[in-house]
Structure formats: structure tokens, C-alpha cells
Image (cartoon, rainbow, N blue to C red):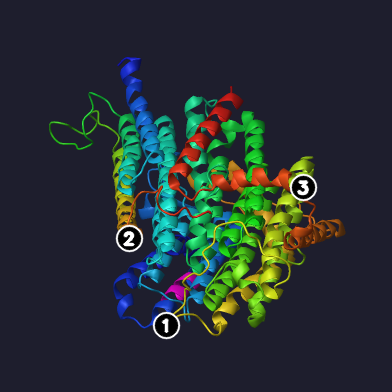
Amino acid sequence: MSAATANVFAPLCLAVPLLAAALLAPFTKHMPRWLSSCIAAGASLAVVGMSIALALYTSAHGPVVHWMGGWTPRGELAIGISFSVDAMGAGLSAFIALLVFAATVYTWMKFDLVGTLFHSLLMAFLGAMCGYALTGDLFNMFVWFELMSAAAIALTAHKIEEAEAIEGAVNLAVTNTIAGFMVLLGIGLLYGRTDALNLAQLGQVVAQRPPDALILASFALIVCGYFVKGAVVPFHFWLDDAHAVAPTPICILFSGIMVQVALYGVTRIYWTVYSPALSPHAHEIKALFLGVGIATALIGAIMAYAQRHLKRLLAFSTVSHSGMFVAAMGLFDATGVAAAALFVLAHGLVKSGLFVCAGNYLNRFRSLDENVLGGKAREAPLNSALFLLGGLALAGMPPFAISAAKVLYDASMKDHTLFSVAAFMAFASALDAGAVLRAGIHITWGIGKGQQTGYSPREEEPECDGDRLEKTPWTMLAVPALLLAVAVWVGMSGVLWHGIERAAHAFVDRQYYVAAVLHGVTRALPRAPWEPRTAQDIAINLSVTAAAIVFAFLGLFRDHVPQMLRPIFGPPLKQLRGLHSGIYTDYVAYMMFGIAAYSLYLVVAAR
Amino acid sequence: MNAWTLYFPYAVAFWLFVVGCFGITQSRNLIHTVLCLTVVQSSTYMLLLSIDFHAKAGAPLFSSTNPPGSPSVDPILHALTLTDIVVGATVTALLLALTVQIHRRRGTIDPQRLRPMSE
């Protein structure tokens, strides 16, 4: 591929879905269903193709920088808006588009599109996320972030007849809008100091002076803002309300990539803008990220275990994994970034598959409550098999991709002699997967006792045409099967691992980025060390899987657990559940507390 | 300009952000919440517009009375503020539409009286 083609592909990744959205919005009512599905699927596949081409090109030749309207920088002064595509950004964009493609395939047959704007909104969502992944401009990032939020709000409320869906959308809208304003305030402060919005130029200016209160305040605001969308404690409360009620194809995107995209933003901004200025305080910032990462992972896992509503369970498992991503990127080195990237990829595939299986249960049996479903799923053996396989994959059973991610992740933890962090994460992921397996086993065979806690309506409206589906259409089963197959490939592919490791080394190298964006000097990805998986790593993964199975059976047969243990776990769990009240007024109060705590910590740490 | 006038807009921005969020935490009405959100948003307007404010500088429009090169405020911040307004309008519209729908379904728009979603 030539440089000129690559330069055109960068803006096309954004233009194709947005044009598709504009085309679908007015005409979709008059289109047959297959045509609107074809347009949406075609546009997302085109973005997958272009993004993969960009990822390969940038690996071999260095970043692609496209200046919108030809406004190239004068010296080190960026006067236009750039799309600065590096291998990591292009890879992320490819993954986003792949999941959107999976969502469109899911909606191909029988899915109740209700109004007809579903595909149009989906395309706007895709365009916003790709723009966010590829842009090189801080304010531009904010704009895509907000477009993403607006599309997400509308898509969450897709089942407009269901009051719960609307309440979930309101919780999402209020918290995420405040988050957007926090990010914008941070950007404003940063612009006031630097007169720059381009990430590369911002980094150059910020690096010139030691950080002061203003830089720290802008960092705190941007981090807190993105952590709301990234569902990090104490900003995660909106997530389960929204994910539990969103239609299944949207759950794929919410859990699979939207949360992770926000964390990508924090990482990208840290490495391009703040890394030189904040490096004297790197130790304290690392402690913060590892701390909130552990807290998020544990709270998410415990809450997931205490749910009986399948989608809510999976949503809390996403919260828990978000904590693991934060801890991985909070190592603030290339290995941590690589581990986080591979982990996001692996988790996104498996979690999407699990959500689709849950959606299939809903369409077939009109419920997502594991007590109602208990034993019924014998009628749907294929779906149950996929759900259980997803649960095992989530625990890190080889050869699934998460195991690969865990290996790299554990390795990066060991480098830093952070055994305790790795141990917490292993515990959290075993508990997480244990919850999924518990629900899966109870649903499939009806053995043991289903979880009684957690909110769940007895009966829910299915998402299909008609009352319920007698038989799940093959497309709805093909999606999780294919996603899990890709997850296996990701877990086995040494080339991909090595590529991600190299992309991560380029990602944390600010000069590599600056040279490409401001000086037009590009070079191929740096070489990076890479070790294949060892027998020991596989043993670790297998033991986490075994622990998950133990947790699953502990849950199913918890009546046999000695009575004396109950007072120890019961009251704290009740308190924790009480915090997740489902009312956004409480969530905003926690957010206020969170911003104050993060800012205070950063100020004290950088004293 | 003395320090007091220099920092006053930032203090106002901070106050608007905090008081808007406080309003949301106390809200018993969804429409009130939406209005509180616009108060929070006003803090971003305040901050963006005060960053490059100079009493002596005019708008970045140049003419014979105001030739190119004469002092003007930074147009980028105005562009940012305009974008911000658009974003705010979108979210407000969406939230109000959802409010109407909630009222239709539940007969109330008091968040405390809506059935909590977790237990």
C-alpha cells in the first residue's frame, strides 16, 4: 500500500460510517430490512479492512498523519486538526469495527429493530469511536467522546417502551455528561497554559516546565472524566444500570469496547502530553492507578458474584475487568500497555460472546434471571455450551486469548515484583468467571441453588420480533461462536502478540509520535523483546480456571457452607449492594467524592 | 489587572460546577436535573471564555477600524465554546425526551420515587 492510500484511509475510517449513518437515517424506513443491515455491515467491514491495512502499513512504515483540509503544521505549531494514526490506534479502530460488525450480524434476523434508526445510530457510534481512536487532537477527542455518549444514550433507550431501559439511559446520560464537562474543563486549563490542542505539540510545551498545580488539576479532571466512562471506582455505578437494560447488540459494544476506549484515551493522553512533565511523580501516579485498579477489580467481581440477572452479572464483570486494565496501564511502561491492549482484545471478544448468549436466553425464555432460567436451557444446548465455554474463557483457560493476556500481564507484574497485585487480579478474575460459570451451570442443568440477591424482573420483554423465539436463528448463534473462535486465534497467535508488544513500545515513545506528527519523520515500529508462553504460565491459567470452577460450585451449594461464616461476609456485602442504589443522584454524589479524592491525592503526591 | 480580577472567573467556574452537581444530588425532579446539568455546563463556558479574555482586545474580526495585527481574543476558544453548546443542546434534548417517556411509563419524574433498579 502506498503512502497516499494510507493517508486517504485514515479519514475514510471516520467518513464511511458517518456517511452510512446519514444515508440510513432518512431512508431506512423505506428500505427492506436486509438492505439497511447490508449497508451497516458493509460499512463496518470496510472500516475493519481499512483499519487492518493501516495497522499493517504503520507497523512497517511508521505513523500515518493526515492533516484535515491540508492544514499542515508550521514549524512545531499545529494549526490544523490531525488524524495521527499509529499501530495501536489503527488496531483499536479495527477491533471496534469488528465488534460493530458482530452487532450488525446479530440484528440480521428476527431482532426487533423497533424504530428504524437503530442501524443509523450504530453507524454514528462506530464513526465516533473510530474518530476517537485515530485523532491526534485533544479537543477533537472530546467531540468524538461526546458523540459516542449521545449515540450511547439513544441506543440504551432503544426499548423505549420499557421504563427500566429509559432509567438506565438517564443514569448513563447524567453521569457521562458531567464526565464530558470534566474533560472539557481539563482541556480548557491545558489550553490556557499551552495554547495548543494537538497532542504532539501539547507534549512539547508541557515538557518545558516542571508541573504545577494547573497541570495537575487538568490531569485530575481529564483522568476523572475518562474514568467515569471507563467505569473505575467510584465512578462505575452507572455501568450496570445501563448495560443491564441495553439491547444485546449494544451490550457487545458497551462492554466490549466503549469502556476500554475511554481508558485508551487516558493512556494516550498520559504518554503524549503528561509523561515528561509528570515523570518525577510517576511512582505516586502508578500507586494511584494500581490502587483504584485493585479496588475496581475486587468490587466488580464481588458484585458480579452477587447478581442473578445475567446481563447485570456480566456488566459487573466488565467493571472488574476495567480495574484490571487500569492496573495494567498503570504500570506505566511498554509491557503494561501491551498487556492492557491484548487483554482488552481478548476480554472484548469473550465478553461480547457471553452477552450474545444471554440475549439468546432472553429471546427464547423471556427472562434473564438465573432462577427463572434454571434448568430450562436444556432446550438450547448449543447456546448453553457457548455460554459455559465463554465462562471458562473468561477465567483464562488456555488456549483462549484471555489466558494469553493474563500471561503477559502476570509477566509484567513480576517484572515489578508486584506479586500482591497479580494475586488480587487472579482472585478477582476467578471470582468473576466463577459467577458466570455458576449461572451457566445452574441454567443448563438446574443443579444447585441459583443466586437470590441482586435486582431482576421475573419476566422481561424479549428483543425479537413477536412474543418469543421458538428457535434461535443461526445468525444469533454464529456470532458468539465466531467471536470465541477469534478469541482462540488471538490466544494462539504469536505474530499478533509480538506485533502488540512492538506497537506498545512505540506507543510509550513520545519522540516517535512527535517526530511523525510535527516533523513528518516516520519509522517502522521498534524491535521489542518477546517471550513465548511457558509451561508455568499455562499452569497459572489452569489454576485460575480451577479456582473459578470451585467458586461456581461454592455458589451453587452455598447452603452447605458453615453458618458461622455468614456474619463475616453478609453485612459488608449488603452495604456494598446498598451503594448501588440505581438512582443517579447518589451516583453524582459519589462522583463528587471521587474527583475530590483523586485531586487531593495528586496534589499531596506531587507536593 | 490585579490578582483578584484575574482569578475571579475561575472561582466562578468552580462554583458553578460544584453547585450544579450539588443540585443534581438533591434533585427530586428530572427537569430540575436537566437544568442543573446546564448549570454545570455553564462552568465550562465561563472557564473557556475567561482564559483568553483581555479588556483591551476586541473580537477576532479585522476591518479598517480594527486592522489585522491589533489585539484580539483567541478565536479557537470561541470555537470550542460553540462546540460545547452544541454538545449540551444534544444531551439536553435527549434527556428531556427521556423524561417525557418516563413520565408516560411511571407517572412520576421524581428519581427517588422511580423504582430503584438494584433491589
**Element type at mark 2:** helix
| Circles 2 and 1 on the same chain | no
Residue at numbered disc 3: A565
Q: CA distance from mark 2 to mark 3?
A: 46 Å
Q: Are marks 2 and 3 in contact (CB under 8 Å)?
A: no
The residues colored magenta run A39-45
The x, y position of residue A170, in whole percent, is: 40, 53
In the image, residue B32 above or below residue A431: above
Indicate the amino acid at tag 2.
Gln
Question: Mark 3 or 1 closer to N-term?
Answer: 1
Q: Is residue B39 left or right of residue A532?
A: left
Quarter the N terminus of chain A occupies: bottom right
The x, y position of residue B90, in whole percent, is: 32, 53
Could you classify mark 2 by the number of other residues whose Cα lies within 10 Å: few (under 14), some (14-19), or many (20 or more)?
many
Could you classify mark 1 by the number of other residues whose Cα lies within 10 Å: few (under 14), some (14-19), or many (20 or more)?
few
Instruction: Identify the chain of the residue marked 2, using the numbered disc in the image.
Output: B
**Residue in front for this viewpoint, A192 or A27:** A27
What is the number of the mark on residue B101? Answer: 2
Q: Main secondary structure of the magenta part?
A: helix
